């Protein structure tokens, strides 16, 4: 194992310790104690590698290596450092670690960039605490307004501002970043699927990222006693929700071309064993590589909602997130492929079925993304694992690419 691999494994292992569920995967929700611990580690490493560290009004972390051109736009490299509940150690942090190690190689080899290099660690990509996802990148690009940010609350009713303040962050700092300060964004991510491993190819160069939308659906009925309310007199919110959810797979399959539809979160109120459920709140996640398929499924979802709004049942839907399918920058895609060839690291073109911060940033700057294999295609679970050798390969590719993009000497 070379020094780069050893450092990568050290970073991953250290960050994996900042979890609310030791022994049961990584649970690192945004603005939590575990977020604060990971944040301090990332900032410490940025400083160690000679970067100027700052945080914005969202809590995104930036470590900057100044360029020789005054006021030039930066080449950003990084990913997110939050997790889903009981997730893995690689989804997000592998990309932050890659950014750190690219900066380390710049410093180690005394490379002077003309355009600044910035390592970034983004918050709340998963949306596990405040919903919607991609919050760090949406906030810094202005897709998430100041007002909407302040109105976000977690399941315990804690607002973003309250949560930030509790761990010593300043929500009053600027959030939106001027696109003129961005030259490019590079992101490494684990594939989260089986393709690269099955092909035995160490690098995936991402061509496009799937489009996605997320809804929160609320079904309201009437609570009642489980023993004394006749079946024909019930307005059971959970039965209605279950009937709706059971139809979602069919909607996606009928649409075809890889369209998928998922209910991943469901809350029942009042949640008593002997009480007819009065209210159910659940999420729906719809994804496709073609926007027309997403729109078609949204239409069918609305028809389904209308058909169940009767007999004492009220169904409402709020769209929390909508992202169009995004193509990566063709010049950067070509550069990543050329660099892989030059380093004799085999690659495959690949499309992403998951959403990433890269898709948000592609609206305001030129973006490139690489994948590394995921063992058994697993992600969002404690078994998630990627080989440090593959991460090291990706770091070498990103380092050479970043040198060209920053016009380093």
Image (spheres, rainbow, N blue to C red):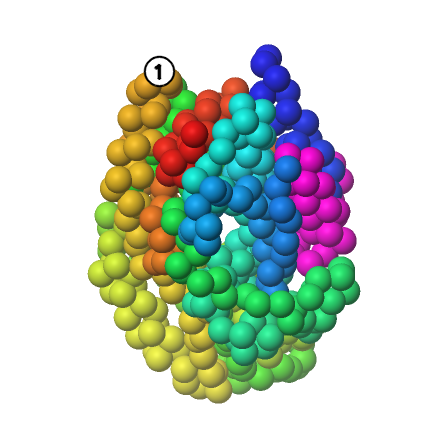
Confirm whether the magenta stretch covers residue 211: no
Looking at this view, is 242 or 7 the one in front?
A: 7
Q: Quadrant of residue 349?
A: top left
Residue 393 in sight: yes
Q: From the viewer's perspective, is 289 left or right of 311? A: left
Q: Residue furthest top?
A: 1
Work out whether residue 189 or residue 298 is closer to the camera in this orientation and state it.
Answer: 189
Q: Please say whether residue 25 is one of the residues in the magenta stretch.
A: yes
Identify which residue is drawn at 69% across, 58% down: 31
Mark 1 Cα shell of 10 Å, populated few (<14), some (14-19), many (≥20): few
Q: Which quadrant holds residue 131?
A: bottom right
State the residue at coordinates (53%, 54%). 125
Q: Is residue 221 left or right of residue 273?
A: left
Residue 177 x, y percent position in the rendering? 48, 62
Q: Where's the C terminus, which quadrant?
A: top left
Name the side, left or right, on which 39 lies relative to 280.
right
Q: Residue at x 54, y 74 (%)?
A: 146
**Residue corresponding to mark 1:** 344
Q: Is residue 92 visible?
A: no
- Residue 287 lies, with reference to residue 58, above or below; the image says above
- The part of the chain drawn in magenta is 20-49
- Of helix, strand and loop, which one carries label 1? loop
397 or 277, nearer to the observer: 397
Quadrant holding the N terminus: top right
Q: Position of residue 43 (x, y in %)?
A: 68, 45
Q: Position of residue 166 (x, y in %)?
A: 77, 65
Q: Residue at x 73, y 52 (%)?
A: 36
Residues 109 and 356: in front is 109
């Amino acid at each position: 194992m070379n020094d780069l691999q050893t450092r990568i494994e050290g970073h991953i292992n250290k960050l994996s310790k900042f979890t609310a569920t030791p022994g049961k995967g990584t649970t690192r929700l945004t603005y939590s104690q575990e977020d604060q611990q990971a944040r301090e580690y990332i900032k410490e490493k940025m400083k160690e590698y000679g970067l100027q560290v700052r945080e914005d009004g969202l809590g995104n972390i930036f470590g900057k290596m100044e360029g020789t051109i005054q006021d030039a736009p930066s080449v950003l490299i990084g990913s997110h450092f939050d997790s889903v509940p009981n997730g893995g150690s690689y989804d997000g942090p592998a990309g932050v670690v890659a950014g750190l190690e690219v900066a380390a190689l710049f410093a180690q080899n005394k490379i002077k960039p003309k355009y600044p290099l910035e390592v970034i660690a983004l918050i709340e990509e998963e949306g596990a605490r405040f919903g919607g996802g991609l919050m760090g990148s949406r906030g810094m690009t202005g897709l998430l307004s100041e007002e909407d940010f302040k109105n976000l609350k977690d399941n315990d009713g804690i607002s973003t501002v309250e949560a930030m303040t509790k761990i010593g962050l300043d929500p009053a700092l600027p959030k939106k970043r001027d696109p003129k300060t961005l030259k490019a964004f590079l992101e490494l991510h684990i594939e989260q699927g089986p393709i690269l491993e099955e092909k035995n190819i160490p690098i995936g160069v991402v061509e496009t990222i799937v489009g996605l939308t997320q809804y929160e659906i609320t079904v309201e009925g009437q609570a009642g006693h489980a023993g004394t309310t006749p079946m024909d007199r019930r307005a059971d919110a959970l039965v209605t929700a279950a009937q709706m959810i059971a139809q979602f797979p069919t909607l996606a399959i009928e649409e075809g071309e890889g369209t998928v539809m998922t209910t991943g979160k469901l809350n029942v109120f009042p949640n008593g064993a002997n009480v007819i459920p009065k209210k159910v709140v659940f999420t729906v996640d719809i994804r496709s590589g073609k926007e027309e398929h997403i729109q078609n499924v949204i239409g069918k979802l609305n028809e389904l909602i209308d058909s169940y709004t009767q007999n004492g049942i009220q169904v409402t839907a709020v769209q929390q997130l909508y992202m169009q399918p995004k193509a990566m920058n063709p010049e950067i895609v070509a550069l990543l492929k050329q660099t892989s060839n030059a380093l004799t690291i085999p690659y495959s073109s690949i499309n992403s079925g998951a959403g990433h911060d890269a898709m948000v940033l592609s609206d305001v700057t030129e973006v490139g993304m690489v994948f590394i294999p995921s063992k058994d295609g697993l992600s969002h679970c404690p078994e998630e694992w990627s080989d440090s050798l593959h991460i090291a390969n990706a770091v070498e590719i990103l380092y050479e690419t970043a040198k060209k993009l920053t016009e380093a000497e």
